[in-house]
Image (cartoon, grey):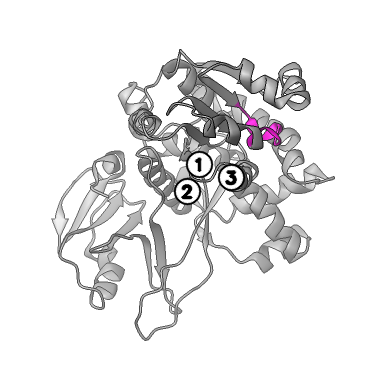
Amino acid sequence: MVTREIESALTNLMQKYPAINITGPRQSGKTTLVKELLKEHRYFSLENPDIRLIAEEDPRGFLRSAGEKFILDEVQNVPQLFSYLQQEIDDGKANGSVILLGSQSFLINERISQSLAGRVANIKLLPLSYSELQSANLNFADINAAIFNGGYPRLYKEKMLPSEFYPFYIETYLQRDVRLLKHIGNLQHFNRFMKLCAGRAGNILNISSLANDAEISVNTAKSWLSVLEASYIIFLILPFSPNVNRRWVKMPKLYFYDTGLACALLNLENEAQIDTFYMKGNLFENFIFSELLKMRFNKGLPANFFFLRDSKGNEIDCIIEKAQENVFIEIKMSNTFSPAQLKNIQLFRNEEPAQNADYLIYTGEEELEFKNVKYRNWQNINRLNL
């Protein structure tokens, strides 16, 4: 079993809150994590029709019979439980006694905000990070292999090829999660929409253009994007707005939580195809962003990432927002160092000078510092102080 980096954040929060809500993509390892770590907790899956029926018919009796410590998996399937959980917690549940798991953040967070606000700590578990794979001696030969395989635990546990995993994952996602979140009649149409989103990974999201290509209305495109966000398929990075006299792009950028899934939607059949694929730079940028997210989430922290682009196309790929000083990060799928790679950092640093070094993450082996920018190989981003 791969040791998950989120364990310390989970155990810490369990000492401070009676309930912990763990959300993340389906099959990201939530159930495995809590079953291995919390052996004293009773486990109930609310996808089991018999257990779900009992919970629906007699929620108070179900919770009382669950014992002092319990785990409720896919808890969004029985939304009426949340009101009864509030009473159970208010009656004196010990810290760390209730663990909620789910793969639809919108459904769960809506119920928590209504019934359990202030009583629950929320953490997110994404697929395996590259540093977790490294710790388990599951290294890749190169960046193309890392991008193409992605991080879903089952892929590695069962020693599966991506072609043996992702098509069935997509089919299961469409049949279960999409139908639960929205009443979408034509799932093939929605699948095509996902493929169009994959073709925009790492790009500015123009919803009107996306809707036009998908042959749907703008409102439908917005609704379907919210489904993909709520079920941890995609995430959006918002633009940073500095207070200077310049026109800035105000639309977000679209990324996938897992690049292996994006590659499957793009119909890539093997890792070698990435070398000549027109989107290889976008996929590399997407991979780095998802790894940065995992670094934050595995510490129990929220995302603090933005990007910056002006109307002339000058862009900083990633801005880490900090209280004292923002950190600029450029992401380049390049094996060689070039001063030209720092053009945009230098341009924007003239307007916002830095005391500490910025970063350039690339595929080259040489790690150096040049003009207050640290070059770091992609395999070492977990060592960045962000």
Q: Amino acid at mark 3?
A: Asn
Judge whether residue 29 can be spotted in this image: no
Residue under label 2 = 283
Q: Amino acid at mark 1?
A: Thr
For the residue pair 58 and 216, the one nearer the viewer reads as 58
Q: Which mark is residue 120?
A: none
For the residue pair 62 and 77, the one nearer the viewer reads as 62
First-in-chain label (1 vs 2): 1
Residue under label 3 = 109
Residue under label 1 = 259
What are the residue bounds of the magenta stretch?
Answer: 73-82
**Residue sticking out furthest to the right:** 185
Residue 130 place in picture, x, y as percent: 37, 34
In contact (CB < 8 Å): disc 3 and disc 1: no
* Depicted 369 relative to depicted 96: above or below: below
Distance from disc 2 to disc 3, alpha carbons, whole Å, reads 30 Å
Distance from disc 1 to disc 2, alpha carbons, whole Å, reads 7 Å
Q: Amino acid at mark 2?
A: Leu
For the residue pair 83 and 142, the one nearer the viewer reads as 83
For residue 212, side relative to residue 318 (left or right): right
